[in-house]
């Protein structure tokens, strides 16, 4: 059995939801407290047993490469000033072997994954999307890899969303379940409101067999005029089983403004030095806003 040791992190999107901030800064580098969002994704991959990561970038994404590179002058400065705790955090972001490839045109998620085909070769691999940060006792990707090792099939990470949210996601149409694992009849990309076959939404974590590239190679245009990964998953499901797995953990949507702000607040409350001052500040805000309403 070939084990899952490689992962793709697509990071070539334009980040239009966060303009003008993302005009010159990649959205993947926007910080949640003191760490860019993409670092949370890389750390999850490493904790899940991934050994080689390829990040698919685009124009204006050079700062991602710089972030994961060594910074000898900065490290020496921190060492001389005995700021060892900060030094350790800085080294954590550079002490991994990461590869890069550029998506030359913004043709969609499916195309971004296809760009990394030569890096993957004929091996199973993982895909992690940067819009989703998951906190879990067992990393969400590790949960999917465990399922792959049992089924030797592609596994798609899902969680339940409300009826009013299904149009924002790829949705699975399950045929039967075994605990948290589902066999799937169809994968539907962003169904129109009221037409979703279920509330199980694809949540940015995948483990694929290499056969997925056969269908990504077709470059078929799907929803939004882009090459959709969900469409290729649907075709893969016709020649070999593709499972959905309802992974455990709290998922944070940092791909849109409100979710990004909520995530920042929740993560800040997990820092002991920030928790009490932030709670006092939030209480003052709520109290002041309540007075305005009255």
Image (tube, helix red, strand yellow):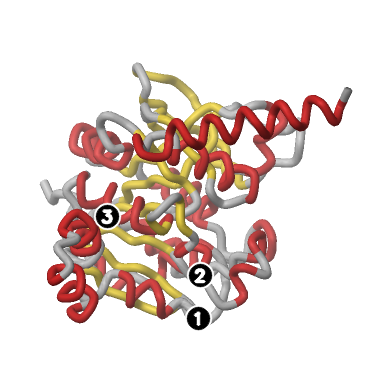
Counting from the top left corner in percent of width and height, residue 47 is at 20, 45
- Specify the farthest residue to the right: 294
What residue is at 40 percent from the left and 70 percent from the top? 56
Q: Dot 1 surroundings within 10 Å: few (below 14), some, or many (20 or more)? A: some
Give percent across and percent down for residue 231: 54, 53
Q: Which residue is mark 3?
A: 125
Mark 2 falls on what kind of element? loop
Contact between marks 3 and 2 (CB within 8 A): the answer is no
Q: Earlier in the sequence, mark 2 or mark 1?
A: 2
Q: If you read the primary sequence from the N terminus, does the residue marked by circle 3 or circle 1 appear first?
A: 1
Q: CA distance from mark 3 to mark 1?
A: 26 Å
Compared with residue 163, is residue 240 higher up or lower down, i.e. above or below? below
Q: Which residue is mark 2?
A: 26
Task: Give the foreground label among 3 and 2.
Answer: 2
Instruction: State the separation of the CA atoms marked 3 and 2.
Output: 25 Å
Near-viewer residue (259 or 194): 259
Please, which residue is most extreme toward the front here? 81
Q: Secondary structure at mark 3?
A: strand
Do callouts 3 and 1 mark residues in contact (Cβ within 8 Å)? Answer: no
Q: Nearer the viewer, mark 3 or mark 1?
A: 1
The residue that mark 1 highlights is 60
Please report contact status of discs 2 and 1: CB closer than 8 Å, yes or no.
Answer: yes
The answer to whether residue 282 is seen in the rendering is yes
């Amino acid at each position: 059995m070939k084990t899952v040791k490689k992962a793709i992190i697509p990071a070539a999107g334009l980040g239009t939801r966060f303009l003008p901030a993302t005009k010159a800064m990649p959205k993947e580098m926007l910080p949640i407290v003191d760490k860019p969002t993409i670092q949370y994704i890389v750390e999850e991959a490493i904790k899940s047993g991934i050994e080689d990561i390829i990040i698919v970038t685009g124009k204006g994404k050079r700062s991602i490469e710089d972030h994961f590179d060594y910074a000898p002058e900065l490290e020496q400065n921190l060492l001389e000033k005995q700021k060892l705790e900060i030094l350790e955090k800085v080294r954590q972001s550079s002490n991994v072997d990461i590869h890069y490839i550029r998506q030359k045109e913004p043709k969609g998620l499916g195309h971004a994954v296809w760009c990394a085909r030569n890096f993957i070769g004929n091996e199973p691999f993982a895909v992690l999307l940067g819009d989703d940060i998951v906190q879990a006792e067992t990393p969400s990707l590790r949960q999917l890899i465990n399922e792959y090792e049992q089924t030797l099939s592609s596994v798609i990470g899902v969680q339940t969303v409300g009826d009013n949210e299904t149009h924002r996601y790829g949705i699975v149409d399950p045929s039967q379940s075994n605990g948290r694992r589902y066999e799937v009849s169809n994968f539907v990309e962003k169904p129109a409101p009221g037409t979703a076959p279920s509330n199980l939404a694809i949540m940015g974590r995948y483990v694929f067999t290499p056969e997925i590239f056969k269908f990504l190679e077709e470059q078929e245009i799907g929803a939004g005029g882009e090459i959709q990964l969900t469409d290729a998953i649907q075709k893969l499901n016709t020649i070999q089983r593709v499972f959905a797995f309802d992974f455990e953990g709290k998922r944070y949507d940092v791909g849109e403004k409100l979710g990004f702000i909520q995530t920042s607040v929740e993560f800040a409350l997990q820092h002991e030095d920030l928790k009490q001052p932030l709670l006092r500040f939030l209480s003052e805000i709520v109290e002041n806003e309540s007075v305005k309403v009255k």
